[in-house]
């Protein structure tokens, strides 16, 4: 995996971790406006990074989240977690 791809995947993982942590925090503190603002900021960042990754390297999931170009395309390289 090239360096740019590794860095982008790492950033996706970091943002995903932050989203999980904020989700758990918000489950217990649903009126915390700052935590909600942070969650929404990270959610937007995750979508941007995911779109960037998928446009460069292909889908991260196997269905429903990333449209395919014609003809049908799938990962021809190692999976993102490999």
Image (cartoon, rainbow, N blue to C red):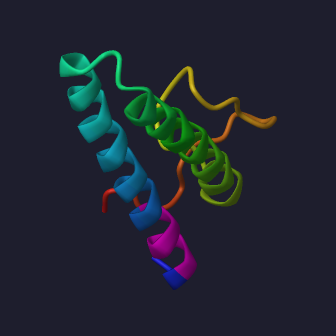
Q: Is residue 50 magenta?
A: no
The answer to whether residue 43 shows anywhere in this view is yes
22 and 72: which one is in front?
A: 22
The answer to whether residue 80 shows anywhere in this view is no
50 relative to 13, above or below: above
Percent x, y for residue 47? 60, 40
37 horizontally vs 57: left or right: left
Percent x, y for residue 25? 22, 30
Q: Quadrant of the N terminus?
A: bottom left
39 and 67: which one is in front?
A: 39
Residue sitting at x 31%, y 16%: 30
Percent x, y for residue 44? 60, 39
Q: How many marks?
A: 0
71 and 38: which one is in front?
A: 38
Residue sitting at x 47%, y 74%: 7
45 horizontally vs 12: left or right: right
Q: Quadrant of the C terminus?
A: bottom left
60 relative to 33, above or below: below
80 horizontally vs 28: left or right: right
6 relative to 22, above or below: below
Residue sitting at x 70%, y 29%: 67
Give the quadrant of residue 33. top left
Residue sitting at x 60%, y 55%: 53
61 and 37: which one is in front?
A: 37
Residue sitting at the far bottom: 3
Q: Main secondary structure of the magenta part?
A: helix
- Image: magenta residue range: 4-9
Percent x, y for residue 43? 52, 36
Q: Is residue 7 magenta?
A: yes
């Amino acid at each position: 995996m090239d360096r740019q791809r590794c860095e982008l995947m790492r950033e996706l993982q970091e943002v995903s971790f932050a989203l999980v942590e904020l989700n758990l925090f918000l489950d217990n503190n649903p009126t915390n406006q700052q935590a909600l603002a942070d969650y929404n900021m990270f959610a937007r960042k995750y979508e941007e990074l995911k779109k960037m990754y998928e446009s460069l390297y292909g889908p991260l999931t196997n269905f429903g989240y990333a449209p395919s170009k014609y003809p049908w395309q799938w990962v021809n390289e190692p999976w993102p977690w490999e």
